[in-house]
Image (spheres, rainbow, N blue to C red):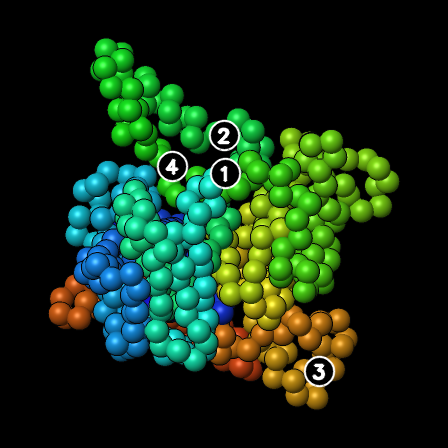
Amino acid sequence: MKFHFENLGLLDEADIELADLTLICGENNTGKTYATYAVYGFLRSWRGILRFVLEDEINALLKDAQQYRIDLVAMFEGKVDAYLEKMGSEYVGGLPRAFATESNVFEHTICAIRCCKATDFLTRSYQRTVQAGASGKVLATLKKEAGSTMLDVLVADAEVLQQPFGGLSDFISDAIADIVFAQHLPRVHIASAERTGAAIFRKELDMARTRMLKAIHQIDSKELKRNPFKILQEIDGGYAWPVEDNVDFVRQLEDIDKRTGELAEANPELLSAFDAIIGGSYKVVKQQLVFQAKGAGKQRFTMNEASSCIRALLDVGFYLRCRAKTGDLFIIDEPELNLHPKNQRAFARLVARMVNAGIRVFITTHSDYLVKELNTLIMLNQRTPHTQAVQRQYVYDEAELIDPQRIRLYMTGVKKATSGRGKVRTLVSAMIYPDRGIEVSTFDDTIEIMNAIQSEILYGGEL
């Protein structure tokens, strides 16, 4: 999946190809967050956008017949990128809401999206029954057999055609989303940079209640009495989607604590690696979330009492344990927050385990420790007799080694404009070598300057 942006906040233009592991590095205020939030916002909302894009085509098929057949190959073969382009254009109109900012901020933004691999229609099967509320009455059945190009829609009751919010067309759009587009557009979860504060104030941070109180305060009391539904029109988020979604997730941790996710079930070593980083485990005791340190007996700490590292990784731990599925895209903004260099290295190894277990990971980072540890994992992946000896000496697991071809790293920077005039702020793809890892000039230049200064202090001047 490739994203192309123009006039996106601090970025004049940017191209991002989502790999199994995608990293963005750069100095502060150079556009990393704009790129990350824009990618997240699209992957969070694409199903609703697709409904809008497909609405007219689907409604044209819903005539008077009782059975409909949609030839998916005829409709989408060779055209997936064209639909993604339409979806990207529609998404630009929603960017102000995704970023919780003024509508004019993105009035010149361009978003173009395309897939990187062929679309598989044939091998996928699908079946869904549409039922009427509490009665359970079957209204329609949507079905596609494996090996078939046809999506069959059998309408059992015309009531489904009159349902609100698009009725049958919405269910058909959802089926197309699952069969055609979901293979390119992964389910997404984000751990935003605000996660540490969310861990402390999660009970107080009720986004829906805050928006409603704000709307009630702003609406004239007479107008509210005359039209009580106006409050629903006025409620809008005051926070960017990544922040809202992060808060909403940590607010429900006590409720999801007993669940074990699909990925954790198949890869329990992921949880062991995570617990080793935090030095214990999260528990819910009598509906209270606590941290229990390894070797501390029954002593437990609330999130207010726990260290900043424990708070910073709270939602990461629960996502891995309770929600993660193969094929997900997990986005984490600055994973190094509040982590000692030793744990930054350990987190890099955890990321490699996640990638090898089937989760795609997207990271923004300032951490030289994290990137250098990834370089170690890349170099060890050569599996020469020498690297294998080093691997054994320093106790690296096979599941922690990573193929450099599965990684993309981008650095914020500038380049010459295609017109030849001036420069544009953009993302520059870093070189990645199997024998020495990733070249990250934003870190290397700073380290070289520091080394030069210290060398001058130690060895410069008169003897």
Amino acid bearing label 3: Gln
Q: Residue at x 53, y 60 (%)?
A: 368
- The percent position of residue 266, horizontal first and vertical second, equals 67, 65
Q: Judge whether 229 appears above or below 92 on screen.
A: above
Q: Earlier in the sequence, mark 1 or mark 4?
A: 4
The reply to whether residue 19 is visible in this rendering is no
Query: Given this view, does label 2 or label 3 mark the residue nearer the observer?
Result: 2
Horizontal and vertical percent position of residue 421: 13, 66
Q: Which residue is mark 3?
A: 388
Circle 4: residue type: Tyr
Image side of residue 310 versus residue 117, left or right: right
Determine which quarter of the picture holds residue 5.
Answer: bottom left
Q: CA distance from mark 4 to mark 3?
A: 48 Å
Which label is found at residue 205? 2
- Marks 2 & 1, CB-CB < 8 Å contact: yes
Mark drawn on residue 247 = 1
Query: What residue is disc 4 on?
Result: 239
Question: Which quarter of the figure is the C terminus placed in?
Answer: bottom right
Marks 1 and 4 in Cβ contact (< 8 Å)? yes
Q: Nearer the viewer, residue 333 or 456?
A: 333
> Going from the N terminus, do you reach mark 3 or mark 1 first?
1
Q: Is residue 16 above or below residue 161?
A: below
